[in-house]
Image (cartoon, rainbow, N blue to C red):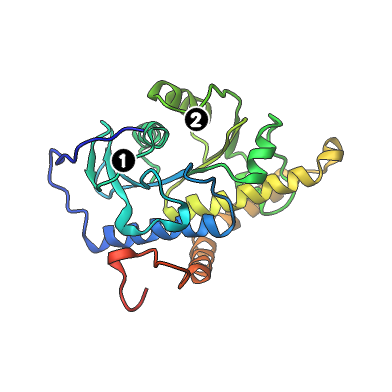
Amino acid sequence: MQIVSQTSPQKPIDRNTPECIELKVKLAAAFRIIARRKMDDGIAGHISCRVPGTHDQFWVNPLGLFFEEVTASDLLVVNLDGEILEGDRPYNQAAFAIHSTLHAERREVVAICHTHPPKGTAFAALGRPIKILDQNACTFYEDHTLVKEYDGVVASTDQAKSMHRAIGQHRAAVLQNHGLITLGSSIEQAVIDMLDLERTCELNLAVLARFDEVQEITREAALQAREVFTSAPRLHFLWNALVRQIEGAGTHYAGKYRTPTN
């Protein structure tokens, strides 16, 4: 954990444009979606989104809030130097190390979701790559990896850089003895990938007794299914359905940005 004084960025950035507000509200919704499926882990875990027009600033959840509590008003803006540019709470040091490193190294990535969901974390302890058992799993065909190196809680950028090297250019990773992580070109993709990856790990666990007998999907079929499951229409419609499920549950995730339509 690190508490840093609020600091102004070198170049003024308007982080309250309609686009930014929409992203903050989406990011807050992401925490509720993960929490609704009991895929969070106390006050651990984090989801981030790069601030549009920047390469060195991202929104992330503050330390000390359950996923089900996070609103758009609570989100911090942190830069790659660890300075808090917006927000009045501290951040999780692991969140800073992981997200700052990955956002710096993977500039095509917009959002990153990292948590310790029960099924994914259990499967991660086996130290095995996932098998492509069904069409849902095909979304990760040739675009996921197993990160075997675990050297404790990620508290330093050196540890985070080691994680980055192991993830490479993949979109998702099973982190041995740790959990799951997804890196998306949008908040929707990072979160839906996390849901899909947890389900994939659950199915892998279900067939573990006969793991070596599993018939994986063929390459041609897997590539076709991956295209469908990662398509913009699927992400759009599924995201809207997920948001409908969390609407009206407790304190609204939009916080001060709530309007009569959300």
- Which SS class for mark 1? loop
- Look at the image and tell me whether residue 59 can be seen: yes
Quadrant assignment, res 158: top left
Residue under circle 1? 90
- Give, as a three-letter code, the residue at label 1: Pro
Q: Which residue is painted at 53% across and 55% down in the image?
A: 34
The one of 82 and 66 positioned closer to us in this rendering: 66
Q: With respect to residue 28, does 100 lie above or below?
A: above
Q: Which mark is residue 207?
A: none
Q: Residues within 10 Å of mark 2 (few under 14, many from 20)?
A: some
Residue that numbered label 2 is attached to: 168
Q: Residue at x 28, y 66 (%)?
A: 257
Which circle's residue, 1 or 2, is located before the other in the chain?
A: 1
Name the spot of residue 248 as percent of width and height, x first. 45, 73
Characterize the local packing of mark 1: few (<14), some (14-19) or many (20 or more) Cα atoms within 10 angstroms.
some
One can see residue 231 in this view: no
Is residue 168 depicted above or below 109 in this figure? above
Q: Helix, strand or loop at disc 2?
A: loop
Q: Quadrant of residue 71?
A: bottom left
Query: Relative to the observer, which residue lies in front, 24 or 111?
Result: 24
x and y percentages locating residue 230 in the rendered image = 55, 54
Q: Residue at x 32, y 64 (%)?
A: 255
Q: Quadrant of the C terminus?
A: bottom left
Q: Nearer the viewer, residue 240 or 232?
A: 240
State how far apart marks 1 and 2 are (Cα). Answer: 29 Å
The quarter of the image holding the N terminus is: top left
Q: Amino acid at mark 2?
A: Gly
Horizontal side of residue 232 vs 198, given as left or right = left
Residue 105 percent location from the top left of the image: 37, 31
Give the percent coordinates (x, y) of residue 190: 48, 49
Left/right placement of residue 184 relative to residue 24 reads right
